[in-house]
């Protein structure tokens, strides 16, 4: 039986619906042997996940997901095998957390101006102490009956170019790559999808370590395409479901989109090489 390695998941510590314990219990049920916790702008759930993973026999790879802006497009980067207790990393993440709060308040103000009356406390209650993301706002709107679905909240109100959209602050891709590298990790382009060639080449030229080849939004032809890019530029590859749970209704992706132990070992070995330099 093939061992499943899912290197892209989220918990309640960012915008996921499950606690680390609940996520690992579901991973066990889905036959996943190794899981990467890659919450947005936070590493707060990793300790809990690692400890519980040791109890039930699932390896947890410490990671995170950061945002950046390239040519006016938002791009997400994944970091793997980071030292999640690194103080400099924690300082950066606190800055991102503060900026997410400011952005959420601006979005809420716009929603109120068009008659969708939610408060920051409504959103804060949904986030439960995690860095506030747009999905938390979407959930708050749904909870109050102001939208019919999670996806309607994005498509009609808070998604890109919608009435209550607010751009979030981005550090440069060079900074994100350095943040991950300084914490001892490797950086990967997350879910590149139909990313413009110029953006892809830009990130490669900046020293990205790899690309997420397997992802729940990548059809077979895209997986083949990014596998070719990985080979062409001598990069590493990763893969995962990007599972969040809850209103996203994406549980079927969990256990269906995954990479292999061989791919994981390639990443791990490159981390070990960096530590010896």
Image: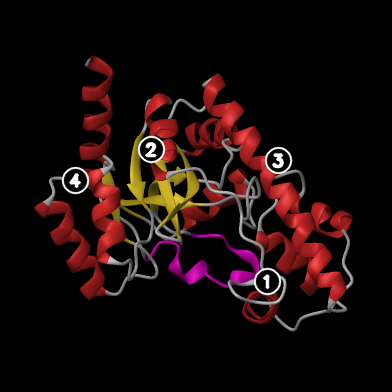
Looking at the image, is mark 1 or mark 3 earlier in the sequence? 3
Report the span colored magenta. Answer: 243-256
Q: Residue at x 88, y 61 (%)?
A: 119
> In terms of depth relative to the viewer, which is nearer, 17 or 213?
213
Q: Which residue is mark 2?
A: 177
Position of the C terminus, as image quadrant, is top left
Earlier along the polypeptide chain: callout 1 or callout 2?
Answer: 1
Residue 158: which disc? 1
- How far apart in space, not on screen, are marks 2 and 3 (Cα)? 20 Å
Residue in the image at 28% along x and 52% along y: 202
Q: Residue at x 21, y 75 (%)?
A: 221
- The answer for how far apart the CA atoms under marks 1 and 2 are is 28 Å
Label of residue 98 in the image: 3
Local crowd at mark 2 within 10 Å, few (<14), some, or many (≥20)?
A: many
Q: Is residue 223 left or right of residue 89?
A: left
Residue 151, percent across and down? 63, 77
- Asked whether residue 168 appears in the rendered view, the answer is yes
Whether tag 3 and tag 4 are in contact, CB under 8 A, the answer is no
Q: Hey, which quadrant is residue 118 in on the image? A: bottom right
Left or right of residue 157, residue 160 in this image: left
Q: Which residue is mark 4?
A: 235
**Direction from residue 14 to residue 237 in the image, left or right:** left
- Looking at the rendered image, the disc whose residue lies closer to the viewer, 3 or 4, is 3
Q: CA distance from mark 3 to mark 4?
A: 33 Å
| Quadrant (top left/top right/bottom left/bottom right) for the N terminus | bottom left
> Is the residue 78 above or below the residue 168 in the image?
above
| Residue 241 among those drawn in magenta | no
Q: Residue furthest top?
A: 276
Q: Residues within 10 Å of mark 4 (few under 14, many from 20)?
A: some
């Amino acid at each position: 039986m093939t061992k499943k390695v899912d290197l892209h998941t989220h918990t309640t510590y960012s915008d996921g619906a499950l606690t680390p314990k609940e996520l690992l219990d579901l991973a066990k049920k889905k036959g996943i042997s190794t899981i990467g916790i890659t919450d947005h702008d936070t590493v707060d759930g990793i300790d809990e996940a690692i400890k519980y993973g040791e109890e039930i026999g699932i390896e947890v790879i410490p990671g995170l997901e950061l945002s950046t802006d390239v040519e006016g497009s938002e791009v997400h980067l994944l970091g793997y095998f980071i030292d999640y207790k690194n103080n400099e990393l924690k300082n950066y993440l606190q800055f991102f957390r503060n900026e997410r709060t400011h952005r959420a308040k601006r979005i809420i103000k716009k929603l109120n101006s068009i008659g969708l009356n939610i408060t920051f406390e409504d959103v804060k209650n949904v986030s439960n102490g995690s860095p506030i993301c747009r999905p938390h706002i979407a959930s708050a709107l749904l909870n109050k009956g102001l939208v019919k679905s999670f996806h309607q909240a994005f498509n009609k109100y808070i998604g890109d170019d919608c009435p209550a959209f607010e751009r979030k602050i981005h550090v440069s891709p060079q900074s994100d790559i350095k943040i991950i590298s300084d914490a001892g990790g490797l950086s990967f382009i997350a879910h590149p999808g139909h990313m413009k060639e110029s953006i892809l080449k830009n990130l490669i030229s900046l020293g990205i370590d790899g690309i997420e080849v397997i992802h729940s939004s990548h059809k077979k032809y895209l997986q083949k395409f990014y596998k070719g890019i990985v080979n062409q530029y001598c990069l590493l590859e990763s893969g995962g479901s990007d599972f969040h749970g809850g209103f996203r209704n994406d549980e079927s992706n969990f256990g269906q989109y995954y990479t292999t132990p061989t791919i994981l070992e390639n990443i791990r070995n490159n981390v070990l090489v960096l530590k010896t330099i």
